[in-house]
Amino acid sequence: MASALCKPLDIWPWLARDREFWLALLAGMVFWAWRWDGTLELSITWPRLLWLALLVPLVEELAFRGGVQGLLADRFPRCWWGQRLSLANLLTSLLFAAAHAGIAAHWNGLLVLAPSLAFGYFRDKYQRVAPAILLHGFYNAGFFLIPNG
């Protein structure tokens, strides 16, 4: 639903108590621990990290979850599979992964499919893009901050 961009940010009290959202944050930390090479060197500059953890998630989520998924949700209303995945989320996530595969130097660009489904899930759940932006920023911060070998 395109109006998800304009709704007030009254979701924070619910989001703070949302066990699924906390599990999504924990999943990001588990992934970072898995890929961490054990070094403590910062492998990215602060301006670049801020760009990748703040601006990129904001723009991508407004475009994909706010735009594409919103339009698809209007076209394919609440078609949930297993009460968790909407057709709009699945199609948007496939497009998101394809876009990242085109940007990435190798097939790892397709690894964004799982996080994208999580971003879309919370966008559907709250009918707002704010949770997707927050989660995407958190994932990007850890991904680019944690050194990997």
Image (tube, rainbow, N blue to C red):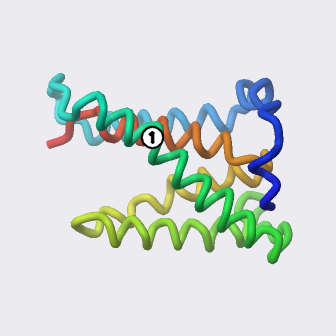
Q: How many labels does the image show?
A: 1
Closer-to-camera residue (115/96): 96
Give the residue displayed 45% in from the left and 67% down from the top: 97
Q: Is mark 1 on a helix, strand or loop?
A: helix
62 left or right, relative to 95: right
Residue count near mark 1 (Cα–Cα under 10 Å), binned few <14, some 14–19, many ≥20 = many
Q: Extreme bottom residue here?
A: 75
Q: Left or right: where does residue 51 sit relative to residue 76?
A: left
Considering only vertical position in the picture, is 70 above or below 62?
A: below
| 62 or 12: nearer the viewer | 62
- Name the quadrant containing residue 52: top left
Describe residue 40's horizontal placement relative to residue 88 as left or right. Answer: left
Three-letter code, disc 1:
Tyr
For the residue pair 99 and 118, the one nearer the viewer reads as: 99
Residue 78 sits above or below residue 19 on the image: below
Tell me the quarter of the image containing the N terminus: bottom right
Q: What is the x, y in percent for residue 101?
A: 35, 69
Does 101 sit above or below residue 127? below
Quadrant including the C terminus: top left
Residue that appears at 71% across and 51% down: 123
Residue 23 in the image, given as x and y percentages of width and height: 59, 36
Q: In which quarter of the image is residue 40?
A: top left
Give the percent coordinates (x, y) of residue 74. Answer: 82, 70
Query: Which residue is rendered at x = 41% and y = 41% of the image?
Result: 140
**Is 56 above or below relative to 91?**
above
Find disc 1 in the rendering and name its residue: 139
Q: Is residue 92 left or right of residue 10?
A: left
